[in-house]
Image (spheres, rainbow, N blue to C red):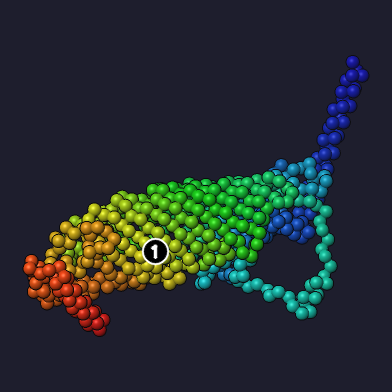
Amino acid sequence: MKKKASIGKKIFIGVAILVILLLVVGIGGVIYLNHYLNSPEFLVKIREEAQAQAGVDIQIGSLSASIFKGFVIEDVVLGSPAGGDPPIFKVDEIVLKYDLSDLLGKKITINKVLIASPRIQLRKDAEGEWIIPGSGKGKEKPPPSGPEKRKEEEKPAEKESSWKISIESLQVTDGSVKLIMGKKYDPVLIEGLNLDAKLLQLTEPREIDGRLDIDGIIIKGETLVSAIGADLHLKGMEELTAAIKAVVASGSLTGKITADLKDQAKIPYQAQLDLKKIDIAILMKPFFPEEGGTKVTGKIFGEVKANGYAQDSDSLTAEGDLDIKDGTISENPIQNLLARLMNDNENIKTITFDQADAKFTFKRMVLNLDRLTIHSHKVIITALGTIDYNRDQEMDMGIGVNFADKLVGDIKPKEIRGIFQPSTEFKEYQEFQFKVWGTPEKLENDLAARLVQEGASSWLKDELFKKDRKKEEDPNLTDEERQKKVDKREKREKQVEEGLDKIFKLF
């Protein structure tokens, strides 16, 4: 019995000594590791590895190591290239979870990088480009030339670290982004940003799967986009794909975005988005004054396709085919003027429509509205033209107002009825056209001038050619004789119109 007890005691003592030795080795390793972590050699290696795997340049401050917690990076700040701007990236703590068993072989396997509550702030410059590291903004040293270049080329290569570093996954929780775009609705806030990405293979090409979730995008206190989810897949530095889904202005947006990463200097992307039940009133609220101005309601359905280059915002090209259902247009100065002139508040002051169709293209920051048609019960409005976002949303639009025949017949005074001509597109409708131009803050139109001109032309033609019209109704005329009289009258009417047009141009 004593012998057995002695053996058990020896085993216990041996295990205890082994544990103590492991602790000593672990503590010694951590002390050495802490020393090494704060060496320039390690910081350069971490930076290079992070850049190779994630495609971003990460500046790292001081590091510490814990057996239980992992590597800890505190108070990380990435300054803006533009002097005087707040930091672009700021986070209190980054934790790197590692595999302790790999340390004995001078290998660091980081199972997960944990970034809690990062704060990002980005701003556009006067040219509309984002100020970010590597964008060429701010002060940068010119490339060396002459003797300086030769000196740099002759510099001996830096000794490669004996430590091998591998990063397997990344997790970002509760991040926030503040965007300053130089617009009246600034800032744009992105809140509740969460990212979970995992490296699928360590060999080239590295593949990464990730999930991005965002609580909301807020503009002027209004949450326009919420519950954003994107499933990401990165295939080395070859291709990035994202399947996205979000709630937009009480409606839904789904789609797919792909980017070709082979040429880092010029990254082309493509997007295809489907829209359903997006509320126009909610979508437009942050961009229009709370009081006054046009009020539009309705739900947007349709498809938008876009492509461009990530580094060049002006390269964005898009086209869309949209439907707007169950909507209204009201409190528009042009509508109000028409309603007063035509004494018709019921059909004109508030236009209720059950269907609207729009086709557009977007290129070089210019929106080309190929066609907008708003269908109401008695009024159909058409519009086409451009909106130039390079010039404060300067607009140049042609507007067509089509009234049902019966509605035109009810217009008082009757002289205004003459401004309408039979519509070539809509059966049993009559059309009147005018132009709108300028920026949203200073829109101009020729509606009143056209009403006066067309009204005057209509009244004058009615007075001058009243007798000719009666003669054309003579039942004794042959068809050939009647047509000759009609052609003659129409020719003289055209001359009157041209004469009035020249007179009005003087004003």
Check disc 1 and report its element: helix, strand or loop.
strand
Question: What amino acid is found at the position of numbered circle 1 in the picture?
Answer: Leu
Q: Is residue 112 visible?
A: no
Name the residue: 62% across, 70% down: 136
Whether residue 218 sits left or right of residue 477 in the image: it is right
**Residue for badge 1:** 369
Question: Horizontal and vertical percent for residue 149?
Answer: 77, 75
Q: Is residue 55 visible?
A: yes
Q: Say which of 122 and 315 sits in front.
A: 315
Q: How many marks?
A: 1
Question: Horizontal and vertical percent for residue 237?
Answer: 67, 56
Q: Quadrant of residue 41?
A: bottom right
Whether residue 356 sits left or right of residue 115 in the image: it is left
Q: Residues within 10 Å of mark 1 (few under 14, many from 20)?
A: some
Name the residue: 37% across, 53% down: 323
Q: Is 153 placed above or below 285 here?
A: below
Q: Which of the image's four quarters has the C terminus?
A: bottom left
Q: Say which of 345 and 62 sits in front.
A: 345
Q: Say which of 490 and 35 sits in front.
A: 490
Whether residue 187 sits left or right of residue 130 in the image: it is left
Name the residue: 83% across, 46% down: 105
Q: Residue furthest right?
A: 3
Q: Which of the image's four quarters has the N terminus?
A: top right
Q: Quadrant of residue 504?
A: bottom left
Q: Residue furthest top?
A: 1
Question: Horizontal and vertical percent for residue 430?
Answer: 22, 62
